[in-house]
Image (spheres, helix red, strand yellow):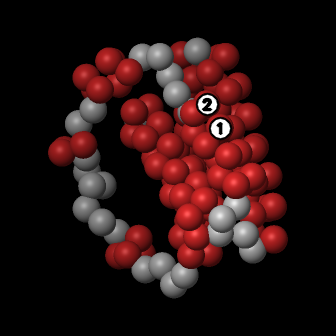
Amino acid sequence: MIDANLNRLKEGIRVIEDIARYSHNNKKLATQLKSLRHQSKVDDLQNLLASRDSINDVLRPTVESEMHRSNLESIIVANYKRAQESARVLEEMYKIIAPTLSETFKQIRYELYTLEKENLLTNE
């Protein structure tokens, strides 16, 4: 669960970061997102990789709604939500494993809320 949500968090941030960088030429937002992506890490990579079982993931098949995006904004919104939800799962799981990391993922989640608002209200 931690591995999947960590990947989802970083991937969601990366999609938004690349749109900010390459499509919107928004260096400030891209830099902020890059910083968040780099904060989204844990030191237990070997155990995470050992527990990964993506081939047998029961929700691996693509959901129809994931295949429809109408424009860049819809991609941005979907990826902010994906990243925020993943940060929340990590925050909750680390409450029982490593409370310090729980707080880190909470801060990442709240920063994503702030960036989402700024990003979507300015259309950049």
**Where is residue 72 drawn, in percent x and y?**
56, 75
Q: Mark 1 points at which residue?
A: 35
Q: How many numbered discs sit on the rendered protein?
A: 2
Q: Position of residue 56 (x, y in %)?
A: 19, 44
- Snapshot quadrant of residue 107: top right
Q: Is residue 21 left or right of residue 1?
A: right
Residue 85 visible in the displayed image: no
- The quarter of the picture where the C terminus appears is bottom right
Quadrant of residue 34 within the rendered picture: top right
Foreground residue among 57 and 116: 116
Residue 110: x and y, percent?
75, 43
Name of the residue lying farthest toward the bottom: 70
Mark 2 residue type: Gln
At 75% across and 52% down in the image, what residue appears?
A: 28
Q: Residue at x 81, y 61 (%)?
A: 118
Contact, mark 1 vs mark 2 (Cβ under 8 Å) = yes
For disc 2, the marked residue is 39
For mark 1, does the 10 Å Cα neighbourhood hold few (<14), some (14 to 19), or many (20 or more) residues? Answer: few
Q: In this view, does 107 lie above or below 110?
A: above
Asked if residue 9 lies left or right of residue 57, the reply is right
Binning the other alpha carbons within 10 Å of mark 2 as few (below 14), some (14 to 19) or many (20 upward) gives few
Task: Say if 62 sits above or below 69 in the image.
Answer: above
Which residue is more in the foreground, 94 or 14? Answer: 14
* Amino acid at dot 1: Ser
Image: 86 above or below 98:
below
Q: Which quadrant would the N terminus be assigned to in this image?
A: top left
* Secondary structure type for disc 1: helix
Which residue sits at x=81%, y=71%?
122
